[in-house]
Amino acid sequence: MTRITLGELKNATRNRALRRPQPGDSRPIPTPMPTAASAVRRLHRESADVAAHRLNRAFESSDYWGPNGPAPARGWANSIRTCFQTYIDLASGDGRPTLNTSINLDVFVGTDSVGVSIDVVLLDPRGYVGRHLLWDTPPLTQQDAEVLAAPVVLALQQELGADRVVGVEVWHLRSGTQIFVDSQTALGRVAEVEQIVGAYTN
């Protein structure tokens, strides 16, 4: 059994020729995504102002992401700031409450698994709706949204009950694109996810 992350699935979905590097072939690089995810959670638990302030303070006080860091890192941090403002703008009109917890678990697709992290779960009148955020540049397509929604729906069903999950909102923050994928459509992509993971890891 091989485990990949949802981020790896995203990359392998966009580029079906991509293969997972062999151990030792690549070194992990610093990423601002934990800070970005924390800001999203804080927005829903506290306020947009508090979340934006803490996000900016975290970057400005960092030796890597802040004023003294390398230019690519500063640029990445600024992109996260811009994307987070987009998230604030998009989310501000949604009055649905959110589940006051994150969901982090592995879901099986065939003999492999995908690690899923869901920072926003909306309490919709019809049931639970997950929100999956993309912070990167490549545009979001309907097909990619459906593939990425599949393991998210599996995780939501595993954690909250199969009959209570409505679907997943996939938001591309660079463009402001929002795509809703209902649970039935997402689950119809599970076999495709299995194929993508199998090809990526073999």
Image (cartoon, rainbow, N blue to C red):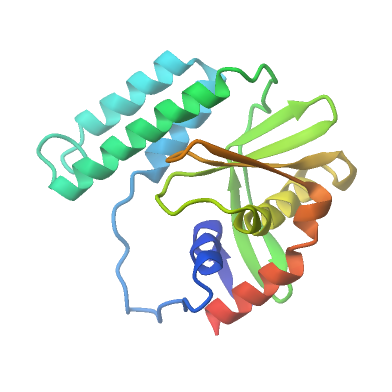
Q: Position of residue 84 (x, y in %)?
A: 42, 31
Quarter of the picture containing the N terminus is bottom right
Residue 113 x/y as whole percent: 65, 67
Q: Is residue 29 left or right of residue 163?
A: left
Q: Hey, which quadrant is residue 75 in on the image?
A: top left
How many tags in the picture?
Answer: 0
* Front-lying residue, 144 or 130: 144
User: Which residue corresponds to the image point at 54% horizontal and 77% vertical from the top-left?
Assistant: 200
Front residue (pair 92, 119)? 92
Front-lying residue, 134 or 45: 134
- Depicted 111 relative to depicted 32: above or below: below
Picture coordinates of residue 77, whole percent (x, y): 28, 39
Relative to 6, does residue 76 appear above or below in the rendering? above
20 relative to 103, above or below? below
Point out the residue furthest to the bottom here: 202
Q: Is residue 110 left or right of residue 142?
A: right
Looking at this rendering, what residue extends furthest in the left direction? 68
Q: Position of residue 173 (x, y in %)?
A: 47, 38
Q: Residue at x 55, y 85 (%)?
A: 202
Indicate whether 76 appears above or below 93.
below
Q: Residue at x 15, y 39 (%)?
A: 63
The residue at the far right in this view is 163
Write down the quadrant of residue 35 in the picture.
Answer: top left
Q: Residue at x 64, y 26 (%)?
A: 100
